[in-house]
Amino acid sequence: MSIGVDLGSFWALTPHALGLIAKGYEIAAKRQIARENAMAHLQGLYFCEALYATVGNMLSSKNSRKYEYPEKPYELDLDEEQKQSREERQIELFAAQLTARMNNFNLSKEQG
């Protein structure tokens, strides 16, 4: 029943057909998990952008250029290598800019 076969169909199916249905259900479940995982990852990227556009700007010096939240959504049709390199660059940039802004914030607290 948990794989989507009603009781009437269950008794009419051969063990081989039932195995194929179970395998198909397993593949569909794995795809759903992968999709939900990708959506959670994408949501995390948007959260990082929002955090940087708010807290990062708050901690930056008054003379530095303010970070703007992206106006358009990320493009999702990139191949895996392009996605990974883009994400790595974004993470490195975010970490470097946040570190610089924290240092500026700490310096301004010490000075004043």
Image: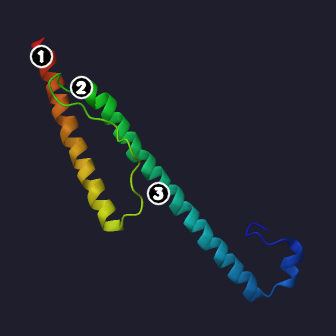
Going by the numbered disc 1, the residue's amino acid type is Glu
Task: State the SS at label 1.
Answer: helix
In the picture, the quarter occupied by the N terminus is: bottom right
Residue 59: which numbered mark, if any?
Answer: 2
Q: Identify the image quadrant of residue 93.
A: top left
Taking the image as shown, residue 53 lies to the left or right of residue 8, namely left
Residue at point 26%, 34% (across, down): 67
Taking the image as shown, residue 74 lies to the left or right of residue 1, namely left
Q: Position of residue 53 (x, y in %)?
A: 32, 33
Q: Position of residue 82 (x, y in %)?
A: 30, 64
Q: Residue furthest right?
A: 8
Mark 3 Cα within 10 Å, few/some/many (few <14, many 20+)? few
- 20 or 35: nearer the eye? 35
Taking the image as shown, residue 108 lies to the left or right of residue 47, namely left
Residue at point 23%, 53% (across, down): 89
User: Disc 1 designates what residue?
Assistant: 110
Of the residues tagged 3 and 1, which is closer to the observer?
Answer: 3
Residue 56: which numbered mark, if any?
Answer: none
User: Disc 3 designates what residue?
Assistant: 38
Going by the numbered disc 2, the residue's amino acid type is Leu
Residue at point 28%, 56% (across, down): 86
CA gap, disc 2 and disc 3? 30 Å
Looking at the image, residue 79 lies above or below residue 16:
above
Q: Residue furthest left?
A: 111
Going by the numbered disc 3, the residue's amino acid type is Ala
- Precedes in sequence: disc 2 or disc 3: 3
Q: Identify the image quadrant of residue 46.
A: top left
Looking at the image, residue 50 lies above or below residue 92:
above
CA gap, disc 3 and disc 1? 42 Å
